[in-house]
Image (spheres, rainbow, N blue to C red):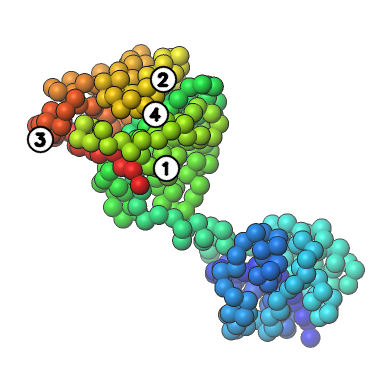
Amino acid sequence: MTKVFVSGCYDILHAGHLRFFEEARSHGDHLTVSFASSEVLWHHKQRKSSLPDDHKRALLAGLKMVDDVVISHGTKTGMDFEDDFLRIRPDILAVTADDQYADLKRELCARTGATYLVLDKTPPQFAPVSTSSIVRWVQAPSQVALRVDFAGGWLDVPRFARQGAFIVNCAISPLVSLHDWPYEKQSGLGGSGAWAILNGRDGIESEIDLGVGWQDPAVIRETGLCVWRSGDRPKLDFKHSGDFLNHLMAIHWTGKAHDTPGAADRARDYDRIAASGRIAHEGVLHQDIGRIAEAVSVYHETQLDEGMQPLPEIPGSIARKYCGGGHGGYALYLFADPQHRDHAVRTNATLRSIEPFCR
């Protein structure tokens, strides 16, 4: 009888695990599955087990391709199963191609005469998943806010960061979900960051990988009216509920999508962008809509110099700018009072009201 042995955490079973077990079993007549006890899991990964050990053992033992299940208690990193392996003396140790402890396991096989067998982690018919990705998916929020940015944009891109500079933005409602997205796509409101968060991914790393900045997922996670310090990663300087902006904001759809990554390396006046951030910082600190409007106008000057088309003047508005990378998407309009905002929304088909959102 050819005995096959596999080991792992198997903390949340998924189809990739089942196919791995099936393939491992196909190389022998008997399959033993070893999983790390809850104590070992905490010792090595500082992570709670998803199930009590006896429940996990019963679940694994109920699989048709599994002949035996053992719970490992060893304290040697990556080799918690070693004592059971030496007791059972299997003929084959099956591992996945990305095994972190390959050298230790190869040495164990050489010492015992077992065959070291490398199998695919996830067969081609399944998209790769992991316990960590499943946990992130389960923990992902069902709804998130998008955002508008007032000033300091691009200074959240690590390669453009400036010490002492600020990025000022605000989470907005209505909220979005994977099933309800009441805004245009590719619109400059932080949609790609929101989509990553809703799907359980690290929004900040996703945005930086795209070559843009971290401000979208940062304020979406934080919510509120936020002042951030420019740098490689988000660092909140201070936050306000944004309630003094209630009924004073609207967004105008320009009629075309925009591409933030494609605009990232255009020439622009970063000195003036940094100046806009300082002004907006003061505006939030003193809850001064006039000062924030000044910051928005200063930033908009840099957008026009960059080659963006002039935005339409809307009666009653006190400032306007493109959201996100501009050259399309939504534009933000600020108003001095709710009456002017509401009238503008009623009389302009391309304009819609938004409100600050703070959790």
Spot occupied by residue 328 in the image (x, y as percentages of width and height): 30, 29
What is the number of the mark on residue 222? 1
Q: Please say if 336 is above or below 224.
A: above
Residue located at (85% from left, 68% from top) = 109
Q: Please say if 180 is above or below 146.
A: below
Which amino acid type corresponds to the residue marked 3 in the rendered image?
Arg
Of labels 3 and 2, the one closer to you = 2
Residue at which label 4 appears: 168
Residue at which label 3 appears: 346
How far, Cα to Cα, is label 3 from label 4? 28 Å
Please, what secondary structure does the residue beneath circle 4 have?
A: strand
Which amino acid type corresponds to the residue marked 2 in the rendered image?
Arg
Are there few (<14), some (14-19), or many (20+) residues within 10 Å of tag 1? some
On screen, residue 200 versus residue 245, left or right, reads right
Spot occupied by residue 40 in the image (x, y as percentages of width and height): 70, 67
How far, Cα to Cα, is label 1 from label 3? 31 Å
How far, Cα to Cα, is label 1 from label 4? 13 Å
Rendered image quadrant of residue 183: top left
Spot occupied by residue 271 in the image (x, y as percentages of width and height): 45, 14
How far, Cα to Cα, is label 2 from label 4? 9 Å
Rendered image quadrant of residue 132: bottom right
Are there few (<14), some (14-19), or many (20+) residues within 10 Å of tag 3? few
Residue located at (70% from left, 62% from top) = 43
**Looking at this view, is 316 or 103 the one in front?**
316
